[in-house]
Amino acid sequence: MSKGSKIICTLLVILLVYSAAIGTISALGQLELKKTVEDNNTEMTERLRKITDSYGEDPGTEDDVLICGEYTIRSTRHISDAYLSGDTSALSDRDKETLDMAKAVLDEIITDGMTDFEKEEAAYLWLTTKLHADTGLLDVIPSTDDGADNPYGVLKNHDAVCVGYATTMRLFMQMLGIECKVIHSSDLIHSWNLVNLDGDWYHVDCYSDAEAGNYANFNMDDTRARSSHDWNAEFFPAANGTKYSYAEMNAVEIKNIYSIPKAIKKLLESEQSIGCYTFRQKIGPDDESAAAAMISGITERVDGLNETSIECVWSKNADGDFVLSVYITRYNEENETDVNEETQEKIDQAIEDALGDYISEHQYDDSDDYYWSYNGTNAFEAAEIATTAAVLL
């Protein structure tokens, strides 16, 4: 199925979900909430119409791009130029506030003597670990009106859609004197960055690495990026850089493909998020299928264990030799609470004593096949959750 067909199918799923939500609420007899959902359904339909109208209209430009009829990507060059010149007199109050917030971040993460690569890496790590990824309607459409698509809102609220990550990364880089572009997918439903280091371009997708910071989409060349991204290659410059790819800089040599399982076990037991491996025994054409089978077998057995996700990617280095990059994402580490068993039992008991009856009364009842909710709000929230899930899937 083409990408365009998938988008259209997704939109149909969304409309069906909302229609189902209305039917459920009608069964409950909650007319006021039914009208609320119908109003939201009308608004959602209009938003979806704008998306379908703008789908695939690649303008072949970096800025002044209308995204799904929702907002326009704007240049922040005037802000970075004001920072570099020290003259902010021409900036609006909002732009001055944006500059102050961006400067505060750079003052925190950038130190004297850093190379451009180290500055880029510091900005990438801040963006991927300090922001919350806004997973609204598609990657590019915020779920709220807090400015998740632009540096002002991102720096103020620490919430960003992909465009917010990309425009904020570009602002950081341009303030540091590093050439950087916002690049869009050909269908305008995703954005990321091109960064120039020592004359070579690299793809950097902070949104895709959000809250993981595992370098899976950091400093990719075109070949690596093409596995998960699509863009207008006629407009944007080619990314052929390999010197600053994470795999090129950090690869460890292991004996052969049968050494991969032990290497991955060591990586899983460490606190590292990425491992890159070259092979003493070169991988020839006859070995490629065995190497692919090895990775498939490891992924099937390990992915998902201990709240850990594993991704393995093959590439070639400057010498044309195979490099295996293994990316680890560990979930819920920041959500774990540091309390002892006795304290946790007291917490659980307090929640049960105060809310147990309420939870039992209002939770989902399979026998009645609907969702009871306080003032009916959860019925609509459930529809929103289902809609978002349908889009993201």
Image (cartoon, rainbow, N blue to C red):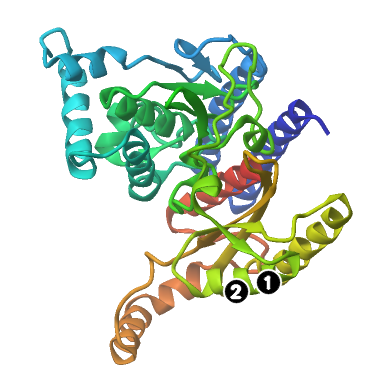
Q: Residue at x 25, y 19 (%)?
A: 80
Mark 1: secondary structure: helix
Provide the residue designation for mark 2.
265
Locate residue 234 relative to residue 197 in the image: left or right: right
Expressed as whole percent of the image width and height from the top left, the position of residue 168 reads 35, 30
Asked if marks 2 and 1 touch (Cβ < 8 Å), the reply is yes
Question: Are there few (<14), some (14-19), or many (20+) residues within 10 Å of tag 1?
Answer: some
Write down the quadrant of residue 145 in the picture. Answer: top left
Q: Residue at x 44, y 68 (%)?
A: 271
**Looking at the picture, which amino acid does disc 2 mark?**
Lys
Q: Residue at x 66, y 41 (%)?
A: 319
Label disc, if present, on residue 388 of the rendered structure: none
Eyeballing the image, is 170 above or below 205?
Answer: above
**Looking at the picture, which amino acid does disc 1 mark?**
Pro
**Image quadrant in which the N terminus is located:** top right
Locate residue 258 relative to residue 251 in the image: left or right: right
Expressed as whole percent of the image width and height from the top left, the position of residue 12 reads 73, 33
Mark 2: secondary structure: helix
Provide the residue designation for mark 1.
261
Expressed as whole percent of the image width and height from the top left, the position of residue 274 reads 52, 58
Q: Nearer the viewer, residue 252 or 16?
A: 252
